[in-house]
Image (cartoon, rainbow, N blue to C red):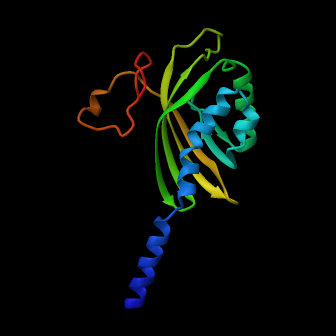
Amino acid sequence: MKDLVLLFLAATLSVAAQTKRDEEAVHKLPQSFSDVFTKHDGHELARIMADDVDFVTVGAMWLHGRRDFEKYHTRLLSGRFSEAAIRPLQIAVRFLHPDMAVVYWSWRLEGDRNVDGTKRQIRCGMMTMVAEKRAGTWLVVVAQNDNAIPGAAPEAQGIKNPIPIPGPDQEPP
């Protein structure tokens, strides 16, 4: 029985451990995404995605696989978003296992256009990514991107948001 308890404790401790290098690599994913997005290179942006990525856009389009992610973002970034710039505001990381983490990050986007070509106002939102270390490289395997709705919903009263989203007319943190 004592050996079983020690084995359980050892397994639990090893699951929680990850390296400083892995923590830094995962924490850099939002900045890497933003840098390449702002360079308007859908091909390079796809490189941080896993082959089997599931990515839900702010428009509720579910892109399955790196090929569709790349096709969509190459078209978007050379079209309506060819002048868009995105930047991360706040980032929070939670490791689920040493080789899997969830990344929450708020963002601010400006310079994009609506389908009809009219300029959009500055937008803020939040993306959630699940990253997995595959063959020594951290890749995004699942992501959900959401636009923020300005103002707090009455249902949110008394609830602390770990990453509050600024309004488009507010200066981000």
Residue 20, percent from left and from top = 53, 57
In the image, what residue occupies the spot 57% across and 56% down?
Answer: 21
Q: Is residue 1 visible?
A: no
Q: Quadrant of residue 157?
A: top left
Residue 143, percent from left and from top = 57, 42
Residue toward you, 82 or 154: 82
In the image, what residue occupies the spot 43% across and 25% down?
Answer: 172
- How many numbered marks appear? 0
In the current view of this chain or complex, which residue is farthest to the front?
Answer: 20
From the image, which quarter does the C terminus lie in? top left
Residue 107, percent from left and from top = 50, 30
In the image, what residue occupies the spot 53% across and 46% down?
Answer: 27
Residue 155, percent from left and from top = 28, 32
From the image, which quarter does the N terminus lie in? bottom left
Q: Is residue 143 visible?
A: yes
Q: Quadrant of residue 151?
A: top left
* 94 relative to 80 in the view: left or right: left
In the current view of this chain or complex, which residue is farthest to the top?
Answer: 118
User: Vertical placement of 171 versus 129: above or below?
Assistant: above
In the image, what residue occupies the spot 49% across and 65% down?
Answer: 17
